[in-house]
Image (spheres, rainbow, N blue to C red):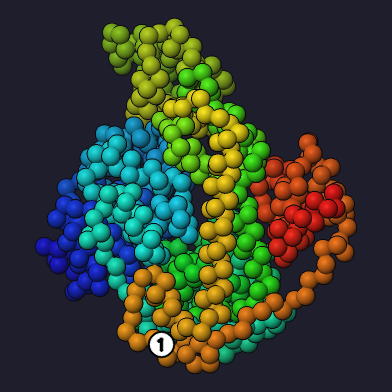
Amino acid sequence: MVNESLKKYFGFDQFRAGQGEVIERILSGVSAAAIFPTGSGKSLCYQLPALHLPNLTLVVSPLLALMQDQLDFLTSRGIPAAKIDSSLMRPQEIDIMRRVERGEIKILLIAVERFKNERFRNFLSKVPISLMVVDEAHCISEWGHNFRPDYLKLPVYKQDFNIPQALLLTATATPAVIDDMCDKFKLERGNVIVTGFYRENLHLSVLPVGEHDKDNTLAGMLKESPQLPTIVYVTLQKTAEHVAEFLTSAGINAVAYHAGMRNDDRVQIQNDFMSGRSCCIVATIAFGMGIDKRDIRRVIHYDLPKSIENYSQEIGRAGRDGLESDCTVLANLDNINILENFVYGDTPELDGIRTVLSEIPRDGSNWEFKAYTVSMASNIRMLTLKTLLVYLEMQGIVRPMYSYFADYRYANKISNDEIVQKFKGERCNFLNAIFSSSKKGKKWSVVDFGSIMENYRTDRSRIVAALEYFDQQGYIELAAKETIEVFRVTNPDFNIDHTAAELYNLFGHKEQVELDRIARMVHYFSGSECLSFALAKYFGEELAGNKCGHCSVCRKGRAQIVRSVQLKSLESFDFNQLAGEFIERLETSPSNDLLARFLCGITVPVITKAKAKQLSGFGSLERYPYADVRNWVDVSR
């Protein structure tokens, strides 16, 4: 039966390595994990079982683009699937929910943040679910390369919604990260299927190139075979624009792609590349997740990747058709500080942590807050704030309860009286209480929960459920915004200064882990070990022999990676000239850490709020080590 589905829906006569073992475990009723290289068919491990499981398969993904690619594939195969995300209009979302409730949808794709949506959780609680699929499952590991705090809550959601099985999918998990994933999902190690990471058709090369020679070297490489599908990876958005312009001026049809572009433009660029209308994409890591173009012949890293994990993921997009493909790194150490600066931006200041802790009620009441407001007040990035909240939970100080929308408003499609007339008895009084207490505007009426509950004996959940029902029936158009996070304070007697210092040290440790990850990557590219075998070993695969015979180390020996640009002394810069305009723009005197981040081009909430990225001093010292800039600020200010 499974083999029939494999042929009917996917057109395959047999499984790839590991797929059959994972699918067998899922259909036998146990949870499992698939640790396969990029492009090795992880998605089939849930797509095929979903057709045979009795209830919904819920797929959690970290990226909207990844969800869309998977949805397009599923619908093209005649598999009933849908996604719910922020791109949908409310009527579309309601239609999908109804189809899910009727059992017409077998696979539903969502982003992890969707679980925080009060309306979505109400819907999900009514739906029987057979399987939770966690895509990019390494995100659940705090010490993985792409930790997502919201992923830590997935095992809790699995329990809350009575989901009997989980399937974890990832291409970039080291043995330690796999252990962490298994621990969090209570997954037996014997149900983790790991296939080989070594791909013989990928020819890995490290080419030492001075910063000033990179453009010409890259253009020369591309001119040899301009028609070959190629991805050129860069670190910064402005670098993507610069390199694409240079290549175009050199007669190469290249186009930039990064997260700063309009979504419609990105979609068009991606479609042109997938269809073969364009051959060269110069992109940040915003491009690639979920891209399944089989014939990419070259992946070139113009800048060093962020980590060995990122490198493995990015080169994994080459040669998925099994034919030989080249993966080349244009290497020097000139921009290594830019990678490190991304790490420093995620480490909050001690005063910022204290600001967050001071918001926590000490009187036994729940802690309710808007994450954006707290992020701005503490100058802590949103993702880092989520991590901080997870740390507070781990220390037993708070426990997340739920989130809800602060603002519900509705626009009538039929009158309030017509709605009330559709009900009888106590319900009519309940609805009159809602409508009479709402603040009416020209089009929208704002729901006043406090006033309703003061005048009528009810609770918030019943009010929301009624509004949701009216919205689904087409009586009103319902809109909600401004999420309020609610935490129970489990230890209101914590010491703010002591806890802040502990958390600050914890973030310092995490910072060092990330810096060490960059150092390991540099060591990998400059080492004397076969690149292919060393990469496999990093992910826990032991291969027979010790060299592939076709990487640059096997062919020419180790690469000498050095700094090619001599930086002038920091003392030669004028502090006031670089930072003065930024200081004047702020409402309060900035800390030296904030000034160093501004000069190194590290974006944090205060810089965003002040629109300081437009200032000439922003990022003016991005090639200097952060610690050196911070010390220079101490002396110069």
Residue 440: image x %, image y %?
A: 54, 17
Where is residue 217? Give x, y as percent.
Answer: 65, 85
Q: How many marks?
A: 1
Q: Residue at x 36, y 70 (%)?
A: 540
Judging depth in this view, the residue of 339 and 370 nearest the camera is 339
Whole-percent x, y for residue 586 in the image: 78, 40
| Quadrant of residue 289 within the rendered picture | bottom left
- Position of the N terminus by quadrant: bottom left
**185 is higher (above) or lower (below) than 195:** above
- The reply to whether residue 99 is visible in this rendering is no
The correct choice, above or below, for 466 with respect to 144 in the image is above
Residue 285, image x, y percentages: 54, 64
Q: Quadrant of residue 350?
A: top right
**Residue at point 43%, 18% (across, down):** 415
Asked which secondary structure carries label 1, the reply is: loop
Nearest the viewer among 179 and 486 is 179
Answer with left or right where residue 291 lies relative to residue 29.
right
Which of these two is toward me, 177 or 24? 177
Give the amino acid type for the residue marked by disc 1 in the picture: Lys
Q: Residue furthest left?
A: 1
Q: Which residue is drawn at 48% across and 41% down?
A: 391
In the depicted view, which residue is nearer to us: 83 or 140?
140
- The answer to whether 416 appears left or right of 388 in the picture is left
Q: Which residue is drawn at 40% across and 46% down?
A: 152
| Residue 340 image-quadrant placement | bottom right
On the image, numbered disc 1 is attached to which residue?
Answer: 547
